[in-house]
Amino acid sequence: MTAMRSKKKRRTWLAALAALVALASPAVAGAGSKDVKADAVLYEVTENMYFYDALGGIIPPLLLITGQAQPAFRVADATLLGTANLGNPLCPSELLVTNPKAKTCTVTAAGQDNVSLATGRGSVEGTYAVVLNVDNHADEAEYVVQTGSFSGEIDLSTRPLGTITGTFRPTGTDLQIPFSGTFRLPFSLEPGSGKHVGPKAGANAYYLADDGKTRIKVKNHEHLFGKAMVRLEINF
């Protein structure tokens, strides 16, 4: 009997939460916290990348390695995880806050880009979700309380810096919310020359600042399994 009452109470609580979240309209968009540089920061958790030829066909790895095919496009799908500050379209209400002290919401995203190797520019699209942690606060949040999609243009021609512009479209609304973002691809320094090289496990890794010169050391929480993650800063 006690277990039945507990389950009923849990269902009632979840129903109430869902109703309250539905009232938290994404139209309530502010400028975000003044003491941070971005309204949201996401990190690339996984990426699967393929090369395509000029006709749009995927190039088998053996043909690419042996030089029998010339890649024209880089197509990749990725998953991202991060946080958004309270008061912007990805965290419109305190009901969604995952970290009360920091006033942030947890955001997940899955996207795909198609970038020309000739220009470093291309398109990007995907979906996102705002998630809460309702049953195990020791792990990552997983209960979806808001969803939407995004699309835009990506420019990676100035790696290790990149830019993205586009719009977010919250599910169930007619809103198209413009955003801009900066990709910071991590890199390490080649001993002696100081040249930028791919980040190596166990070695210091850096992001490049907006001035194109200053190095920003990658923090411990910006690593996954010893490797630095790509950082995406979003502003509305």
Image (cartoon, rainbow, N blue to C red):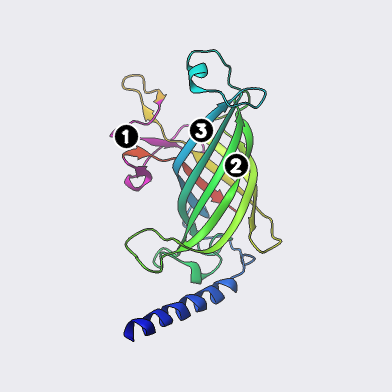
- For residue 204, which numbered disc appears in the image? 1
Tag 3: Cα neighbours inside 10 Å, few (<14), some, or many (≥20)? few
Q: Secondary structure at mark 3?
A: strand
Earlier sequence position, callout 2 versus callout 1: 2
User: Residue at point 45% right, 53% down?
Assistant: 82
- For residue 164, which numbered disc appears in the image? 2
**Is residue 147 at all visible to an observer of this figure?**
yes
- For residue 129, which numbered disc appears in the image? none
Tag 1: Cα neighbours inside 10 Å, few (<14), some, or many (≥20)? some
Of marks 3 and 2, the one in the foreground: 3
Task: Indicate the position of residue 43 as horizontal and vertical percent values.
Answer: 45, 46
Q: Which residue is mark 3?
A: 49
Residue at far bottom of view: 1
Quadrant containing the C terminus is bottom right
Amino acid under label 2?
A: Ile
Count of all numbered marks drawn on residues in the image? 3
Task: Indicate the position of residue 10 as horizontal and vertical percent values.
Answer: 42, 78
**Left or right: where 28 falls relative to 186:** right
Q: In terms of image quadrants, where is residue 182? A: top right
User: Residue at point 48% right, 18% down?
Assistant: 62
Please tell me whether residue 207 belongs to the stretch shown in magenta: yes
88 above or below 189? below
Quadrant containing the N terminus is bottom left
The residues colored magenta run: 197-225
Q: In terms of image quadrants, where is residue 190? A: top left
- Asked if labels 1 and 2 touch by Cβ distance under 8 angstroms, the answer is no
User: Relative to the observer, which residue lies in front, 10 or 107?
Assistant: 10
From mark 3 to mark 1, how far is it between C-alphas?
25 Å
Amino acid under label 1?
A: Asn
